[in-house]
Image (cartoon, grey):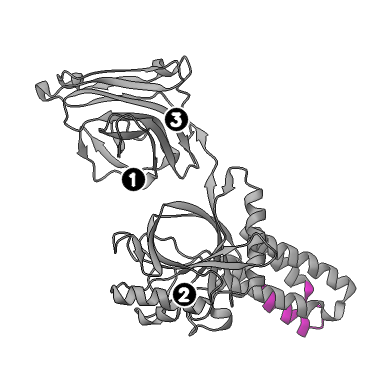
Amino acid sequence: MLNPLVALVMTLSAGPIVADLSSHATASETLRNAVEQGRQARQAGRTGMSPLLKGGIMASEQLGDSPIGLAIEDIVGAGRWRALTEPESAFSWLESELNGVRDDLEFEPILEAALPLGFPGPTPVREIELKQYPAYRSVSTNLNGDDPGGAFWKLFKHITSNDIAMTAPVEMSYDSSGDDLRETKMAFLYGEPQVGTPGHDGVVEVIDANAGWVVSIGCRGRETDAKIREAQDQLVAWIAARPELNTEGDLRVMGYNSPMVFGEKRYFEVQLPVQRTATSIVDFGSKEFASSWQVINDSVMGGRSTSMIWSTDEGTGLFIGNMSLENNGGFASVRSGPIGEQLAGAGQVTIRFRGDGQTYKMRMYTDTNRRVAYQAPFETTKGEWSEHTFVAADFTPVWRGRVMGQMPALDFALVSNLGLILSDGQEGPFRIELSAIETR
């Protein structure tokens, strides 16, 4: 259970910030009207069950297959059974359950400190969502069976002595492999990843976390082991129904509130880190690979650079050539044939390569404006296999080397072609070998 001391210092930051969560307004209003109509029917001498049941069904349909929509569906089913078996208490029970759901639909978490840079907002209560976190820096300490209150003060001493602002949430990691939950680590998150320096600082350690995905469920009330276990079970079932996801880390709880926030006003998230199952976009070993990629060098503008691309006996793609700066040249590139909608639904694109120490750029094109390339750089180490993972926000639209500020941000779902370009201003031979381009 998250110790109430964990977020005490959040109140030392700026005043409360109310999260801008979806209110599920339509379904909430449907339930409100259903309860009111049910009460009016009761006053007229009827059971009042019909308006409640109809309103519940409508709200469930409005919310679709979301966890809270399915929860309403279960409540309606139980309400019908109670109407047959316990008619005297059925109305009161169903009214209470629907009002409870409505309260959750309208709930807005109170954030007592700012979120770290680029963090997604809180997940709505009872809902489960897949969301991406940016790379971030934190200071953490292992609990090793210690009281979380002691860990809190170790972390508090670190941030105050280094003049680092408190953020929300506080991260608690758990070992959930046994019958009991066991807290293993507590972390305060830095507001920006550039703040501070990684490494040990006495009994705490400043560490960097890579960007990644989690499946998260929003929860109200005090962070009890029972609630955390129940939320974990829901997350596990949700992930199991999605074969494109694999659990890739320990259970964690993100606590947002200090002891100054009481009871059902409290909010926390239970999360499981996940990784998308990789799906290959390009088969570099196929006979059609080389013929489907087009070489485009600075020769189109009078330059003298040369390049070619082909498939190796090892099933990789090899892009090699010679860079020349003569006649105002200085770039060599390749562009794939159409890839269909292979990037639709992707959150990340990963390229695996063995380079020559130069900086290349990954390119993506859309049918909206085929002359504009969205590009993002990646560095290589000579002779070593490496990989680089991109998100859509990494890409900048360019045309003939100039940034196009009026173009919309890249949407992976619209990508029709891929490409590579070398334009780092260095003359001489170049070589990059590609083994995979995958989506996750």
Q: Earlier in the sequence, mark 3 or mark 1?
A: 1
Check disc 2: other Cα within 10 Å, few if <14, some if 14-19, many if 20+: many
Residue 151's tag is: 2
Is residue 179 toward the left or the right of residue 409 in the image?
right
Looking at numbered disc 2 in the image, what kind of residue is underneath it? Ala
Camera-side residue: 212 or 47?
Answer: 212
Which residue is located at x 32 percent, y 77 percent? Answer: 160
Q: Are marks 2 and 3 in contact (CB under 8 Å)?
A: no
Q: What is the CA distance from the residue labelled 2 to the residue labelled 3?
A: 43 Å
**Mark 2 → mark 1, Cα distance in angstroms:** 36 Å
> What element does badge 2 sit on?
helix
Q: Quadrant of residue 302?
A: top left
Residue at 38% over, 31% down: 353
Quadrant of res 95: bottom right
Q: Secondary structure at mark 1?
A: helix
Q: How many marks?
A: 3
The answer to which image quadrant residue 84 occupies is bottom right
Name the residue nearer the viewer: 430 or 287: 430
**Image height check: is 347 above or below 175?**
above
Q: Whole-percent x and y of residue 423?
A: 21, 31
Q: Is residue 92 left or right of residue 64?
A: right
Q: Which span is picked out in magenta?
A: 34-49
Q: Nearer the viewer, mark 2 or mark 1?
A: 2
Q: Amino acid at mark 1?
A: Asp
The amino acid type of the residue labelled 3 equals Ala
Quarter of the image that includes the N terminus:
bottom right
Q: Which residue is mark 3?
A: 436
